[in-house]
Image (cartoon, rainbow, N blue to C red):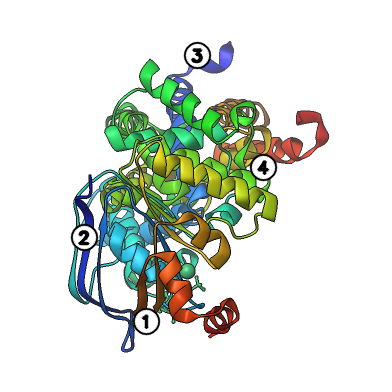
Amino acid sequence: MSDKILEVRNLYFRYKDEFVLEDISFSLNREEFFGIIGPNGSGKSTLLKLIVGILKPTDGEIRIYTDKISYIPQRIASLYHLFPATVEEIVGLGRLSDGIIRRFTNKDKELIEQALELVGLKEFKNRKIGELSGGQQQRVHIARAIVSNPDLLILDEPTTGVDVVNQAKFYELLGHLNKDMHITIIIVSHDISGVASEVSMMAYLDKRLHFIGKPKDFFKKILWPIEIEDLLRG
Amino acid sequence: MDIFRYTFMQYALINGIFIGILCPLIGVFLVLKNLSLIADGVAHFSFGGIALGIILGFSPNVMILVFSIVGALLVNYIVRRSKLYGDTAIAILLSTGLALGITIISMAKGTNFNINSYLFGSLLAIDKSELVFALSFGIPVIILVLLLYKPLLYITFDEDSARASGLPVEMLNTLLVLIGAITVAITIRIAGILLASALVVIPVATGMQVSKSFKGALLSSIIFGVISVILGLFLSYYLNIAPGGAIVLVNVLIFLMSLSRFFH
Ligand SMILES: Nc1ncnc2c1ncn2[C@@H]1O[C@H](COP(=O)(O)OP(=O)(O)OP(=O)(O)O)[C@@H](O)[C@H]1O
Ligand SMILES: [Mg+2]
């Protein structure tokens, strides 16, 4: 199966006068694991917001061939230390994609349990979200995102503030979602090595798409990781 | 109990308990959306409406409702369109309403109108028609919130994620400020313009101290809201003090207690 899930054509975007994204074109097949890297301020988050429909293109078009999308914004974990809600309540929000005015059925509850199990937070389900560590909170958001059975999962720097061991586990989880649950994933990350070893396709964005293709070609083309790090520093 | 021999006390109690349920139910979403002050802004804005009503001969209650709704929609609009935080938009609205009210009242010096009952509330002066007014606007609000409880929680928790999942975020936001406005309009009659927001915010602040779940915070805020109304009303009757002030002070007292270790 390799039909398209996303097509971006000649996309331009500006918040004010200056263009933040210029002439972005690419397409993404189903079940791809797509990593986007680029320096700070290069337009990565903006591109994701355009894809999920929070922002509208200044010019060009974006076509998405599914309406089952889950999105985890950048830095979401740090925002909720005071929010009175349990892990289970937050994960349950993901089930609203099947209709916003309804009572949760046993099926819903089962899916919530499964998602919690998958991210390894079952025993934390009655904890207040703010009383979890940053990495654990990140997994709550993953559970919330996947409990809606999305076709497309979009993550903006999900591993910021997560330690190396847990980052590896995190990528393993994403790999499982991608390969075994057939979820197409788009991830923005600064962690090049982590991304490159997991993804099936990657892009280097800095206002324009400077590279898009297989990770191994990226390293061939850019030659040497030091150079990439220089690039990332801008 | 002999306090309930009087019909006005019965009305006051029914209306008070109703407000005690309604205010925190809406308040919990407003507080968590960093819009704690919207109730205050909207209430003060309606002061302009009351003054306008006096010189134009319209019912103050209707003017309060209209101005509350317009005020809340304005805040919502300003927050979405301008580069301001919610509290700044609210501060502008609040001053506009007060300035309008003061100006109009100074122009209409001849009218002898008891503005105090609107500034400080007059729970004990509620009659049957006012109770019906409160219930007929308040009950639909309660039903709406119960139906939309989960999507409202989602947009309160994270708008962007909710939008990406296909929730009608703009509509839910507008609805939330609208029902917030109706709630404030009903509450002004009891607690007055100056204290209405206390009933929306303080029980929620208390509920947040004692619960770790959203459902728990919601239920406990409502319980604290209702207890404060009942206790405040008793105090006002037996100590012969203003009910609005007494209810808010009881609320504050419970909040302070919730901060102590005793509650945890
Ligand atoms: N709301 C906004 N209004 C105006 N300009 C913005 C806004 N958000 C972002 N920008 C600008 O757009 C550019 C791209 O920002 P964006 O957040 O997409 O970068 P990013 O690649 O995600 O960066 P980071 O790695 O720091 O997350 C930046 O120059 C930023 O200053
Ligand atoms: Mg970003």
Numbered circle sitting on residue B5: 3
Point out residue A65 in the picture as x, y percentages from the top left corner: 19, 51
Numbered circle sitting on residue A207: 1
Residues at discs 3 and 4 both on one chain: no
Please state which of the two labelled residues, at mark 2 or mark 1, is closer to the viewer.
1
Mark 1: amino acid: Lys
* Quadrant where the N terminus of chain B is found in the figure: top right
Helix, strand or loop for disc 1: loop
State the residue in front, B244 or B198: B198
Residue at point 28%, 43% (across, down): A68
- Residue under circle 4? A132
Q: Are marks 1 and 3 in contact (CB under 8 Å)?
A: no
Residue at point 50%, 14% (across, down): B5
Helix, strand or loop for disc 3: helix
Mark 4: amino acid: Leu
Around disc 3, counting alpha carbons within 10 Å, would you say few (fewer than 14), some (14 to 19), or many (20 or more)?
few
Mark earlier in primary sequence (1, 4): 4
